[in-house]
Image (spheres, grey):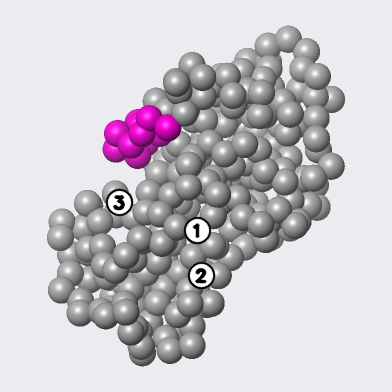
């Protein structure tokens, strides 16, 4: 599998951390704006990159960002190719059987359906529809379980690919994170709209981590708690998600 490794700049290693190493390799997908994406220079950017860098600075670590495809992002964590995942990954009981998570840094976010403007979809008795989802996500599992019998669930490598197929008329609807879909609907200038009801899935978004890396988890959670308390996490959410929040600062 091809990976692109990009070192995050301007992150200072402050002091000697309790964690056994002074750098942390963080994997992200780079294809899920505004959570994470590649900017015009081909560098990782977005909410999670800004937050990850803040976590590293607070924890006295140096961040190294690694771009990894979504479908292999957990297996490659378990293989030791990096130390953390920050990729818009929801905390679920199923994933907790395999990996651990930091405390959440984004609250539970409703999943939502979108469709082309004017689509006449009856979600009370949806049948024969082509439902697009990103493979390996909580939305994919929900769609297969709740919609798969009477409809065709189509999985995509990235959410952007699903949106392209919707625009091309190859899908009837897409189910994805509301925070991902909000700017997409806004940018569509009315050609795409929300349909149906919101669906609550998962327990918020956190950083994925190997179960045995308890010292690293403690260090990340400590840094996150500080960044929540001083308003940094809320400020970054508001910056990247159109004023959303606040959620964490008292």
Residue at coordinates 25% horizontally, 56% vertically from top-left?
Answer: 185
The quadrant in which the N terminus is found is: bottom right
Residue 53 lies in quadrant: top right
Q: Along the polypeptide, which appears first: circle 1 or circle 2?
A: 2
Residue 11 lies in quadrant: top right
Locate residue 58 relative to residue 117 in the image: left or right: right
Q: Where does label 3 land, which residue?
A: 182
Q: Answer few, some or many: residues within 10 Å of disc 3's Cα (few below 14, many 20 plus, some between 14 and 19).
A: some
Instruction: Give how far apart the Cα atoms at labels 2 and 3 are.
Output: 20 Å
Depth check, mark 1 against mark 3: the one in front is 1
Overall secondary structure of the magenta section: loop
Residue at coordinates 61% horizontally, 18% vertically from top-left?
Answer: 58
Q: Secondary structure at mark 1?
A: loop
Viewer can see residue 169: yes
> In front here: 123 or 80?
123
Residue at coordinates 39% horizontally, 25% vertically from top-left?
Answer: 235
> Which portion, as a residue range, is magenta?
237-247
Residue 68 drawn above or below residue 10: below
Q: Are marks 1 and 2 in contact (CB under 8 Å)?
A: yes
Residue 181 lies in quadrant: bottom left
Instruction: Give how far apart the Cα atoms at labels 1 and 2 are.
Output: 8 Å
Q: Along the polypeptide, which appears first: circle 2 or circle 3?
A: 2
Q: Where does label 2 land, which residue?
A: 142
Residue 120 position in % (x across, y down): 20, 79
**Numbered circle sitting on residue 201:** 1
Q: Answer few, some or many: residues within 10 Å of disc 2's Cα (few below 14, many 20 plus, some between 14 and 19).
A: some
Viewer can see residue 89: no
């Amino acid at each position: 599998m091809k990976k692109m490794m990009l070192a995050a700049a301007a992150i200072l290693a402050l002091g000697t951390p309790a964690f056994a190493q002074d750098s942390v390799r963080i994997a992200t997908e780079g294809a899920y704006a505004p959570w994470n994406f590649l900017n015009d220079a081909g560098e990782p950017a977005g909410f999670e990159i800004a937050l990850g860098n803040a976590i590293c600075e607070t924890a006295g670590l140096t961040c190294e960002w690694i771009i990894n495809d979504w479908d292999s992002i957990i297996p490659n964590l378990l293989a030791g190719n990096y130390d953390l995942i920050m990729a818009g990954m929801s905390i679920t009981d199923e994933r907790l059987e395999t990996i651990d998570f930091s405390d959440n840094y984004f609250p539970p976010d409703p999943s939502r359906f979108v469709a082309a403007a004017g689509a006449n979809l009856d979600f009370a008795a949806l049948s024969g529809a082509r439902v697009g989802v990103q493979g390996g996500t909580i939305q994919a599992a929900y769609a297969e379980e709740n919609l798969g019998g009477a409809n065709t669930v189509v999985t995509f490598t990235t959410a952007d690919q699903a949106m392209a197929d919707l625009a091309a008329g190859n899908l009837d609807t897409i189910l994805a994170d509301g925070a991902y879909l909000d700017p997409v609907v806004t940018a569509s200038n009315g050609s795409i709209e929300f349909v149906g009801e919101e669906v609550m899935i998962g327990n918020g978004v956190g950083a994925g981590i190997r179960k045995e890396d308890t010292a690293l988890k403690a260090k990340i959670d400590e840094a996150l708690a500080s960044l929540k308390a001083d308003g940094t996490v809320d400020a970054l959410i508001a910056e990247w998600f159109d004023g959303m929040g606040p959620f964490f600062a008292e």
